[in-house]
Amino acid sequence: MKIAFLGTGRMGSELARHLIPNHDVTVWNRTAERAQPLVDEGATLAATPEDAVKDAEVIITSLFGPDDIRERVIDTNLIPEGVTWIDTTTVSPEAAREFAAAVESYVHAPVVGSLGPARNGELGVYVGTPDDDRREQAMDLVEPWAGKDKLIGVESAATAAIGKLLANLALAVTAEGLLEALQLGESEGLDSEVVLEMLDITGLAFIKNMKGPFITGERNTTPGDFTVDALCKDAKLMEATSSKPLPAVHAAIERFEEQQSMGHGDQDFSSIFVFRNKG
């Protein structure tokens, strides 16, 4: 199948990489050199989004946020009529409804997980559209991204969008919980390694295991897996979507914004732990 893949950032590159062995993939990225590794693996580089989608049977987007989709896709009428558009960008349900109304072939397929699961084909993937045939086509195409029992078809783009926000809400609020646990333990003179060990039998074990290597210095926050900027953007989409206050999400946003003010926005969101005493 001839596929146009727009947006080869950290996650987009991993998604595109799974498609190259079995499809004719043309890639585009705003910074062209970031797409070069995929070209080395067999993809074709396009100079513009318009060049990328020419003659494509399926178009996949993996951009930073809804404003990028509007700029690159909606405002330019980029999607040819009838061509399936699979969008993995994290957007709000409202934006997903907007894009589905603008482009009849829109399928929202946000992914759940970080770069490690992406490389291993173990992501969660929601695939949302009311069009049964397009949903089936999209699920078949993105199956290499998904872990066992983690490929979930839903009946609207907005439902897929809220599924992704729910997943990232869990990430944001447990990150805030881990940070507060570190601060609580340190208040009693415990070092971070002791606190992390004590969290093994708690509900914070998942986030502790995920981000512990950053806290102990085994990994660097640059480049990391999931940036402060990205999770902060997603958390703000949660606040904008909810009809009620989300105080835990808001607390996490304040942590992320503090790291942004320190110049750590493009680093892994574990920066909130690593630089917790330097704000």
Image: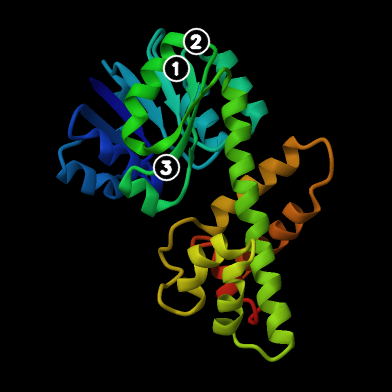
CA separation, marks 1 and 3?
Answer: 18 Å
Spot occupied by residue 163 in the image (x, y as percentages of width and height): 60, 34
Determine the secondary structure under disc 1: helix
**What residue do we see at 83% from left, 45% from top?**
245
Q: Earlier in the sequence, mark 1 or mark 3?
A: 3
Q: Amino acid at mark 2?
A: Asp
Nearer to us: label 3 or label 2: 3
Q: How is the image coloured?
A: rainbow
Left or right: 45, with 103 as reference point: left
Can residue 58 be seen here? The reply is yes
Q: Amino acid at mark 1?
A: Arg
Q: Quadrant of the C terminus?
A: bottom right
Q: Earlier in the sequence, mark 3 or mark 2?
A: 3
Q: Return the residue at label 1.
A: 135
| Residues at marks 2 and 1 touching, judged by CB atoms closer than 8 Å | yes
**What residue do we see at 55% from left, 77% from top?**
197
Q: Dot 2: within a 10 Å radius of its alpha carbon, few (fewer than 14), some, or many (20 or more) residues? A: some
Residue farthest toward the front in the current orientation of the protein: 201
Q: Return the residue at label 2.
A: 131
Determine the secondary structure under disc 2: loop
